[in-house]
Amino acid sequence: MSKPSCCPITRWRRRKEVRPAEILDAALALFVERGFKSTKMEDIAKAAGVTKGTPYLYFENKEDIFKAVLRENLVTRLASFAELEQQYEGSSADLLRLMMRRWWLEVGESPLAGICKLMFAEATNFPELARFYHHEVIEPSHNMLLRVLQRGVARGEFRDINPHAVVDTLVAPMMLTMTWRCSFGKVITDSQHRSMPPLQYLELSLDLMLGGLMTGRQPQQ
């Protein structure tokens, strides 16, 4: 007598392994569309195509899912950006340009941009999540850009001015553009406020900032 096939078990295991990712994808879409407060666990399960109880097999509650969404989609990307920062051998200005472009293409143009708007809108309602976002996303981003600026100063590329203020100035156009895209940009399509494509606007903003930051000297290795 032949042994029972193990294929059904293998398929079930594969399905079980991908379910957390499906739950997180569904949660991201709902968080961006409805906000954190208005999204319920049963909504996430329904959008993911699983039973109401399935999300609880992997996540303790909605807050746990939100944190996992951030880790899976933003924290991992920040790790890849940190690797780029450490390995890049070109000028610090070009590194900033590359990082800005990649962030827009990978985050700003994607549903992930809605997380930025969500955090601005709901931070005071969910302070624990706001602190988590600040610790896992904002602080690492700030520190990474700080290192790029310090690299530029050490190599003689950038003027030695308040680096924390410079970082805030660098990220402000990106924050505005992502927030606009997920709010006014959805209902106002003919506004002169956005007279150029978002990436082109971000490149212009960065070039203006670099014009005041760069020393004009060749970088010192």
Image (tube, rainbow, N blue to C red):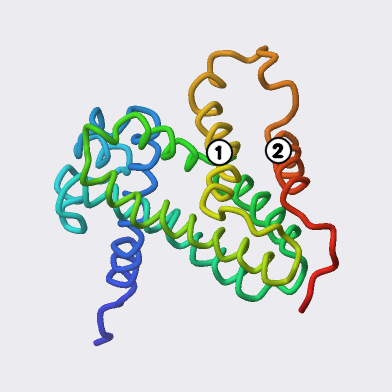
Total labels: the figure holds 2
Residue shown at the point (55%, 32%) measured from the top left: 176
- Indicate whether 41 appears above or below 158: above
Residue shown at the point (23%, 31%) measured from the top left: 37
Distance in Å between CA atoms under marks 1 and 2: 10 Å
Report which residue position mark 2 lands on.
205
Residue type marked 2: Ser
Using a 10 Å C-alpha cutoff, classify the residue at mark 1 as few (fewer than 14 neighbours), some (14 to 19) or many (20 or more): few
Image-quadrant location for residue 8: bottom left
Image-quadrant location for residue 117: top left
| Residue 160, horizontal then vertical, whole percent | 65, 59
Residue shown at the point (30%, 43%) measured from the top left: 49
Using a 10 Å C-alpha cutoff, classify the residue at mark 2 as few (fewer than 14 neighbours), some (14 to 19) or many (20 or more): some
Q: Is residue 176 left or right of residue 93?
A: left
Tell which of 80 and 169 is nearer to you: 169
Q: For the C terminus, which image quadrant?
A: bottom right
Q: Are marks 1 and 2 in contact (CB under 8 Å)?
A: no
| Residue 51, horizontal then vertical, whole percent | 20, 44
- Indicate whether 186 appears above or below 148: above
| Residue 105, horizontal then vertical, whole percent | 63, 47
Report which residue position mark 1 lands on.
172
- Indicate whether 88 appears above or below 63: below
Image-quadrant location for residue 172: top right
